[in-house]
Image: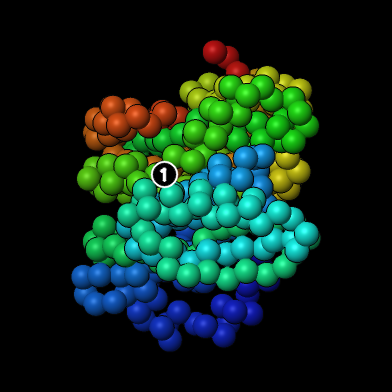
Amino acid sequence: MAQVLRPLSEIFQQRDYPRVLVGLSEPDDAAVFLVDDARAIISTADFFPPVVDDPYDFGAIAAANALSDVYAMGGRPLMAINLVAYPEDLDKGILSEILRGGADKAREAGAVIAGGHSITDAEPKYGLSVTGEAAVESIIRKSGAAPGDRLILTKALGTGVVTTALKRDLAASDIIESAVGSMSRLNRVASELAKSYGVGAMTDITGFGLGGHALEMARLSGVDFELNFDCVRLLPGALEFAKQGVFPGGMSRNLEYFGQWVDMDPALPDYATGLLYDPQTSGGLLMAVAEARASDLLADLRAAGEDAFDLGGVVAGSGRLLVSGGRA
């Protein structure tokens, strides 16, 4: 993807656009544009095909996923535009439910659906283009992790294997219900707590999996991340499906690309590697926070209903992941 974007980076040199605080030259979760000395606009977009069968749930999940990029930057969503691709011969009532799910989630976030764009396509797809705002001093980037920080993740992993199991008719209804609840949960409260605790770096865990997104943070911060896989929380059913090799295709692509910068403990089983690179939909926020504040932040996240856990720390380095475990 970096090679594809290189021509754009050459055309839009960030030095020529001083109000663009975050853009093509420094990859992050969303673009950030400076309005004045105190305020910034955050802009992002995301859409994808259905990951669950229920149209309303799909709409809510897709909306939560798109809104998450604003939360990952420490921002507040203001408005969104529906992005729709839909087959001509599919019942329009299904689309109405998808849009209703997205609208309810946007309203929960305090944002308004202010318009949209649709095209005809062979496969339904849905998502949002989201505009948010943030105080300049509250913007949280991927690049601020420092040695000594603790790493906290706010949602359990496993949405990729669970939704793949759903497509293969392997997942029971209670397992799907747990995954839907996690994917449709907004990262709003987690983001607000991150700002209040002065989190130094943050990103949301989505298509690159925990391994890919953690590696992005480590590389942009110029440090190494030490992850203890034995501390990772998994959604119900995720471990069993992983042991069966029920992974989406994106897992192999993530492993092939990011694996060159990851040192896995040889004691870890192959399915742990798969779960590390399992593409997530509307995953949690990965935070790097000073060790002195980490336990209190973790306690407040859990008190707020987040399934948060400490999974490692930050050490001096050059942008690698060091993954231990397999001995618990």
Q: Residue at left 41%, top 54%?
A: 106
Q: Name the foreground residue: 274 vs 78.
A: 78
Q: Of residues 70 and 232, which is closer to you in this image? A: 70
Q: Which residue lies furthest to the top in this view?
A: 328
Quadrant housing the C terminus: top right
Q: Where is residue 97 shown, x and y percent of the image?
A: 57, 49
Picture coordinates of residue 227, whole percent (x, y): 50, 32
Does 316 appear above or below 91?
above
Q: Residues within 10 Å of mark 1 (few under 14, many from 20)?
A: many
- Residue 112 x %, y %: 38, 61
Residue 191 coordinates in the image, percent (x, y): 33, 46
- Residue 78 in view of the camera: yes
Q: Where 310 sits versus 281, above or below?
A: above
Q: Which of 214 and 101 is in front in this view?
A: 101
Residue in view at x 57 percent, y 85 percent: 11
Residue that carries the numbered disc 1 in the rendered image? 186
Residue occupying the point 43% across, 49% down: 104
In the figure, is residue 139 to the left or right of 48? Answer: left
Q: Quadrant of residue 47?
A: bottom right
Compared to residue 297, the image places residue 118 above or below, namely: below
Helix, strand or loop at label 1? It is loop
Q: Which amino acid does label 1 sit on?
A: Leu
> In the picture, which quadrant includes the N terminus?
bottom right
Which quarter of the picture shows residue 92?
A: bottom right
Give the residue displayed 58% in from the left and 54% down from the top.
Answer: 96
Q: Can the viewer see residue 201 in this picture?
A: no
**Total count of labels:** 1
The colour mode here is rainbow
